[in-house]
Amino acid sequence: MAVTPRFGAIILCGGQSRRMGFSKALLPFGKKTMIENAIDILGQIASEIVVVASPDQILPELGSIIRIVRDPIAYQGPLKGMQSGLMHISDQIDSVFITATDSPLLKPELIHHLSNQSENFELVMPFDGKYYYPLTAVYKVKPVLEKVNQLIRDDRHRPFFLMEELHSKTIHVNKIKEFDPNLDSFRNINTPGDYRNILQTTNLPIPEEFRAPPIHIEFYGVPRLITKVAHATLEAENLAELISELSRNFPELKGPVIVNESLHPAYRFMRGTSEFLMDLQDPLVANDKILILAVDAGG
Amino acid sequence: MTPGYHGKYLRIDLSNQIMDLPEIGSEIYSQVIGGVGLGVWILSRETEAGYHPLSAESALIIALSPLVGTPLTTSAKFAVIAKSPLSNRICDAMCSSHFAMAAKKIGVDAICIKGRLVEPSILFIDGTGDDPIRFSLSTAAPYLGDTAAETERKIRVESGTDWQIISIGLAGEIQIPFATLSHDGRHAGRGGLGAVLGSKNIKAIAVRGDKRTNIANTNETMKIARSLSERSFTPATAKYRELGTVANLLVFNRFESLPTRNFQEGSFLEVESLTQHDLAPARKIAKNSCAACTIGCEHIYSIKSDKGDQPKGVRMEYESLFALGPLCGVSDPEMVLKASALCDEFGLDTISTGGTIAFLMECMDKKFIPQGLEDNVFPKFGDGESVIRLIHDMMSPDPSIIARLLKLGSRRAAQEIGQNTIAFAQQVKGLEMPGYHPRKLHAMALGMTVGCRGADHNRTGAYEVDFREHDRSADSVALAVIETEDKAAIMDSLILCKFIRGVFQDFFQESAEMLSAVTGTCYTKSSLIESAKLIVRMRKAFNQREGWTPEEDALPESIFAQDSVEDSYLTKTSLEDLIKHYNAGRGFSDEGWLNDTQMQCISRLGSDHSIE
């Protein structure tokens, strides 16, 4: 993919990473960090890249061609970050792709496609029928900066307001599948579970300190018949992640036991023999014994 | 006539060899529905208080239901109802398949057998053609000692394959109080109904007919039937389809609820040797299903044949596996399969057989041995050979003293042995406990304790409460147990197989729709719940008439937690508290008696339930 003249990119990496508990920019992604990975992807299409970081944020050596801008005050939200980025992009750049540092599977083809749609619009933003993606979108530098400044003055800090007030085009994600069949570009990392999931998708190793606690699964009845094992040890920090791990390790469970990333209502999880686990976000702790059983006990 | 029904039952007085066809009013059907409900109603009006279950005065009822013969899956079932010779209380057991459909085609909704013949006989009931229903008798001499399956086969060879047959094995002939009555390899297993038939000198009943009942709303019935069939293929029934009930073994073991060595423990160390995974690949030779069933829960296992014999298969269920395996401490699957096959052949309830043998084993362990008996004749935990030997011994014309004790069932054996061995005779009302150790399953403990049939897992689904998230207060547990008992009363009266229960979103609502479509009578969810409560009360009323006392609603002493065990274990006080809440929830007196209004409602139905 060739670099597009007058097209730049802004990476917002100054967020708090609260749910992650670790700076997302510095998360290992293969041999690189996430920020380096983002730069590598964007470098394939953008002629200039600005990284917006928080005042004291530690970043790896990014090379002299990357401009690093520090927010004056930390954690003021994405609109402030966009403001910093847009103010510091050079004059030759007409439009920019703005992203965070946490979407490691971004496809340059997708960015190119959005950029191609942007000639007559100030903002081109994907939409999936429910959500808009302002941090996977292409913006015209000058009019957007003006609007951002105004919104900040008015104390209206949601990026969504840009969509309403700029001359915008939304693109349904279904039309993007041509470039990104699994819509991987929209998979971002907010939690350690998201991080592990993405690493597993890409067959990259999970750093030791980010591994989920080991959980001992006991299969009974049909799940045991299907998996052909009585026990397994998987790593997961909650039921949702456990289901995802079960699907990955025992794909044959999908359909008869796991449906729509949830347990089929004919089955249930128990922690030991006394605690019924109902909520997918129920936290698991190391060495939990989780039983997968038919609801229909007895008979 | 109300669609789905014939409007009458067949009453045969064997002593006088006469029959008649008493009518049943539509107001009765709309309240008792069929199956167990109808059977209890007939039994109550056909018998006098205080009769002996194996006397000529006793009655055996075979009750059908409005759903029999419809395309609704699992509906080809019949209920058998009588006073149990094991418990002296109500006994109702289900059986299934072609007999249900053939019996209904006679042109009646139930068959009531009273009196007694002088000689062992086969009873033929013919409802074909334009002639009125008629019955005939022929000698059972050529079939005596035969298995039920062999008897069925021979009669069909000799009389024609249009006959469908229920039969008893040798255990029924010699009136062992836990003898079964069976059809096509399936047993109305609990409580000794086979002995009741045997006491009437009937070896088998053969039926045929060609009378069909109408369906009120065919389109609606077909629609429901299609939906039910589709749902019967979903994961909700996969356990039964793929593994059968033996899948319970490992789960119950994990929950420390697998009764082991006569309920002394709740888990069995050698359990893995008995699991379906060891049994299945090498041994499972066939799967089978009842007539009109889309689930197909029967899993047939092969047994190593003795020299010169044909290889045999045995249908294995969790209850047989637990009772003849862990309950007796037996871990050799070959021994368990053989013992189970033997019970099938003789027509013995596997739970009561295993339960009583396990009781005798514990007597041996604890040196509670009746005078005049040598130690070495007692069976020992873990000795599978002795289980098989005892079953054979029990059937011999001259059984040993120990086999004579076994023939009594655990309660009466304990009474014979004395020395307070009743404390570990694991039964309620004389019926041996099924494979649910109640010390951690408090809802099930309550269900088994208050159950009219005795310790029972089919007239209550209380274990379902224990195996789901629930409020553990006594009041909530009691109400949940009542609900499962009500649900079972309707399933057993419709009749539908319990294995389909997981597919319903709203069981009472969907059942009301089903019944309304078939019968044209307007049933609602609330009317069906009322019927359920009435059926439960009618069973209780029968027991009260036959001498029930509140003391019968109790578990054996040995079940209760001693000091220094886990908090989650059942105590006598906690069970008594549950019973109190159950009685309140049912509207009974504190002690558990039906109240006057409840009795009056039952009396108005025309059943004789006078309580002294």
Image (cartoon, rainbow, N blue to C red):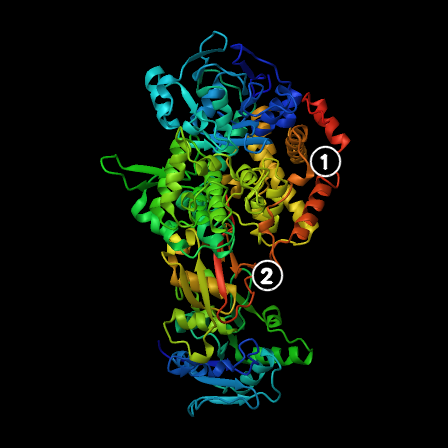
Q: Callout 2, which amino acid?
A: Glu
In the displayed structure, would residue A286 be above or below residue B93?
A: below
Neighbour class for label 2 at 10 Å: few (<14), some, many (≥20)? few
The reply to whether residue B227 is in sight is yes
> Which mark, by number, is residue B566?
2
Q: Position of residue A249 (x, y in %)?
A: 38, 63
Q: Secondary structure at mark 1?
A: loop
Q: Name the outermost residue toward the left.
A: B308
Residue shown at 27% from the left, 37% from the top:
B311
Residue B593 is labelled as: 1
State the separation of the CA atoms marked 2 and 1: 33 Å
Report in which chain the residue with disc 2 lies: B
Is residue A118 positioned above or below B398 on the image?
below
Asked if the residue at tag 1 contacts the one at tag 2, i.e. Cβ–Cβ closer than 8 Å, the answer is no
The number of discs equals 2
Element under label 2? loop
**Residue projecting furthest to the right:** B596
| Residue B124, picture quadrant | top left
Residue A41 spot, x, y in % from top left: 40, 78
B24 versus B564 height, above or below: above
Which numbered disc, 2 or 1, marks the residue that appears first in the sequence? 2
Quarter of the image where the C terminus of chain B is located: top right
Q: Residue furthest bottom?
A: A64
Label 1 packing within 10 angstroms: few (<14), some (14-19), many (20+): many
